[in-house]
Image (spheres, helix red, strand yellow):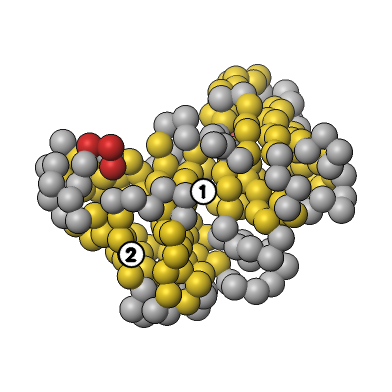
Amino acid sequence: QQQVKQSPQSLIVQKGGISIINCAYENTAFDYFPWYQQFPGKGPALLIAIRPDVSEKKEGRFTISFNKSAKQFSLHIMDSQPGDSATYFCAARKSGANNLFFGTGTRLTVIP
Amino acid sequence: NAGVTQTPKFRVLKTGQSMTLLCAQDMNHEYMYWYRQDPGMGLRLIHYSVGEGTTAKGEVPDGYNVSRLKKQNFLLGLESAAPSQTSVYFCASSYLQGSLREQYFGPGTRLTVT
């Protein structure tokens, strides 16, 4: 049973466009929501993370939007670049715990 | 600072063979984790350790054993490999305390069981 549901499975965006990846969860015990970026042949690396006490967090071209009532969060990549082509995973962690529950991943391709 | 390293990078096993994957970290992290990554499944936690000498089961522990004899090392063992264990295995580590407790991942080991 997937604790964090992620969509879409794959995404193709033109250079300069906006990439949007969505995640949803059911467990209200989750209190930390990171996004990981993974390039081919590499391990995932933390990109940006949010806690449910804020509705949005922005770091450069990457923004997380969080809707606590809907139990959904999303990653927006503004001005997408070919170098952003990677697989993106959302994840969630319960309060007081260290273990992460990952979504199934989204393969993003940015076309020049 | 090497971060998290994994040995080997690639391995091919025949069904029934055994092997051990080694993970090492030089960040003095208390927590260490083993994940497997399969297409369309994301990363799933196999086992984890909260400190030297302690281990615990994750989401998909069957068929695997682990040991943490030293704080910096976390070993993942397959006693009798099965084709269903063909996967990419990632090790990660993190601090036990702190507001983020970010997990740092190794480069992965690609295992094929024939």
The structure residue drawn at horizontal position 68% and vertical position 34%, both measured from the top left corner, is A23
Q: Position of residue B109 (x, y in %)?
A: 32, 50
Pick whichever, A89 or A12, lies toward us.
Answer: A89
The structure residue drawn at horizontal position 36% and vertical position 68%, both measured from the top left corner, is B74
The structure residue drawn at horizontal position 33% and vertical position 64%, both measured from the top left corner, is B66
Q: Which residue is mark 2?
A: B66
Q: Under tag 1, what secondary structure?
A: loop
The crowding category of the residue bearing disc 1, from other C-alpha atoms within 10 Å (few below 14, some 14 to 19, many at least 20), is many
Tell me: A83 left or right of A15: left
CA separation in Å, label 2 and label 1: 22 Å
Q: Which residue is mark 1?
A: A44
| Residue type at tag 1 | Pro
* Chain under callout 2: B
In the rendered image, the vertical position of residue A11 relative to residue B7, given as above or below: above
Tell me: B12 left or right of A42: left
In the rendered image, the vertical position of residue A28 relative to residue B101, given as above or below: above
Quarter of image, res A61: top right
Q: Position of residue A65 (x, y in %)?
A: 81, 39
Q: Which mark is residue B84?
A: none
* Chain under callout 1: A
